[in-house]
Amino acid sequence: MTLRLTAISRRTVKEWINLGPRFLPFADAASEDLPLARLLRLSLFQVSVGMATVLLTGTLNRVMILEMGVPTWLVATMVSLPLLFAPLRALIGHKSDTHRSAFGWRRVPYVWYGSVLQWAGLAIMPFALLVMTDAPDAPAWAGPMAAGLAFLLVGAGLHTTQTAGLALATDLAAPASRPKVVALLYVMLLVGMFGSSLMFGLLLSNYTPKVLIQVIQGAAVVTMVLNVIALWKQEVRRPRDPKALKTERPRSFRESWAQYRADPRSLRLLVAVGLGTAGFSMQDILLEPYGGEILGLSVSATTTLTAMMAAGTLFGLALAARVLGRGYDPHRLAANGALIGITAFSLVIFASPFESAVLFRVGTTLIGFGGGLYAVGVLTAAMDLADATDNGLALGAWGAVQATAAGVGLAAGGLIRDVVTSLATSGALGEALAVPATGYSVVYHLEIAILFAALVALGPLVRRHRAHQDPRTGFGLAEMPG
């Protein structure tokens, strides 16, 4: 009887051990060298990045316009300032590749620098905002300049932290587990954005300037705490000979960039990253107004759209982690994401003439799903291009293109919608197009065209990868004519 119970207990324990990898898509992202607890701790830097992103582009955006009465153009300028630092991510990544610390660290100092910049920007931000709106004796330029400096510091910090943090994760992860690690890091970014948006909304429900100061400075403290925990004992110290530090000449950025560009896939992949990111980003500020203005949805109904898109994104990340972990081509995965995005935007467009909220909701969910597949696919491909010493440069280049394309796409989407809607409602485009939906429709059609261009950029990359695979596998994107 005892032996039978022992055998049953062993089988039960075995089933519980197998339960995680089977039903939790990221449970097997860990490896022997990177246990799950250590990986989850490392991913906390993404939570701090998500929190800073929500604070800059969501919470403060709303508070500055409505509660503080700051002009919209000035708020838009402030929010766009962090994008000025995005193109420098490739240089930051290169510096983290070639950093010669006497302690033997490469990535840790740059994550720390980024954390300090984030903290500094958040520390001065509430006082800068108060000077801008509540200090009549201060010079007119003092408030906007101080607020701009705060936004710029936070943007520089989050770009530096994320670039070096992703490179560190790539260094630590085994090649076979990198797709799952990428997906997990994306999930933690979403967790940071979602959780912080709820927390900021709750804390600022009874807005006062004092509460605003407490919330922003609390975010500064949380940023430092999360990033210190994330960095603790992550990167192995490899002390160098002090004499070698004086004589060894690290590769310059130009030399490293030339080596990176020598791979014919690199530029094409960056083009695909930019096109796909812009294609999925142009609608970010248009979906909820489209649902309310064109389909007549209530405020509560349009608010749920963000949750639906997030759910689609999470499902896309989970699926991407699963199939990439089985050896699926990341370029083909990104192409599948673009095709799903094209279908999704088509459904959103047809929702207007059919007056169908169901089509709109399905399309919104598929936008998140396709965007998740595309993001993980191109980031995994960028990781595959990097070698052990140039992870930072490759991921920095990816981050620079991705962040810049997202910002440009977001701004272009709003501008194109406003211009086209103004022309359409004035009758300049003809009687048939003199409806409010025209501006939105033009943006969505343009996104479809951009995603098709992304497919063109990805096609040869899929074909090149396929040349090393079994030719008996099925027909795919690379075999399409043209």
Image (cartoon, rainbow, N blue to C red):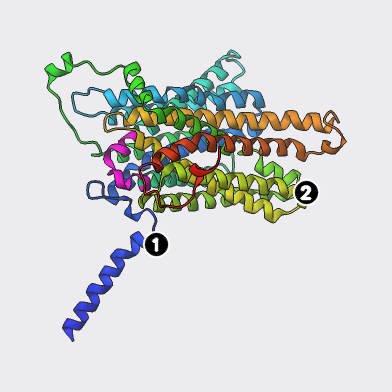
Q: What residue appears at the point 35 percent right and 20 percent down from the top-left corner?
A: 258
Q: What range is drawn magenta here?
A: 165-180
Front residue of this view, candidates 306 and 422: 422
Using the numbered discs, state the Cα–Cα distance from disc 2 to disc 1 in whole angstroms: 40 Å
**Left or right of 353, for residue 1:** left
Q: What residue appears at the point 36 percent right and 24 percent down from the top-left corner?
A: 262
Which residue position is annotated with label 2?
A: 353
Q: What residue appears at the point 62 percent right and 48 percent down from the top-left corner?
A: 343
Question: Residue 457: x percent and y percent?
Answer: 51, 33
Secondary structure beneath dot 1 equals helix
**Residue 395 sits in which quadrant?**
top left
Which residue position is annotated with label 1?
A: 23
Q: What residue appears at the point 66 percent right and 27 percent down from the top-left corner?
A: 72
Say if the magenta span includes residue 464. no
Question: Residue 337: x percent and y percent?
Answer: 52, 45
Q: Amino acid at mark 1?
A: Phe
Front residue of this view, candidates 219 and 320: 320
**What secondary structure is the magenta-colored segment mainly?**
helix
Say if the magenta span includes residue 178. yes
Question: Residue 296: x percent and y percent?
Answer: 76, 49
Q: Circle 1: is it few (<14), some (14-19), or many (20+) Cα within 10 Å?
A: few
Q: Amino acid at mark 2?
A: Pro
**Residue 161 sits in which quadrant?**
top left
Question: Residue 429: x percent and y percent?
Answer: 82, 30
Q: Earlier in the sequence, mark 2 or mark 1?
A: 1
Q: Circle 2: is it few (<14), some (14-19), or many (20+) Cα within 10 Å?
A: few
**Left or right of 10, for residue 155:** right
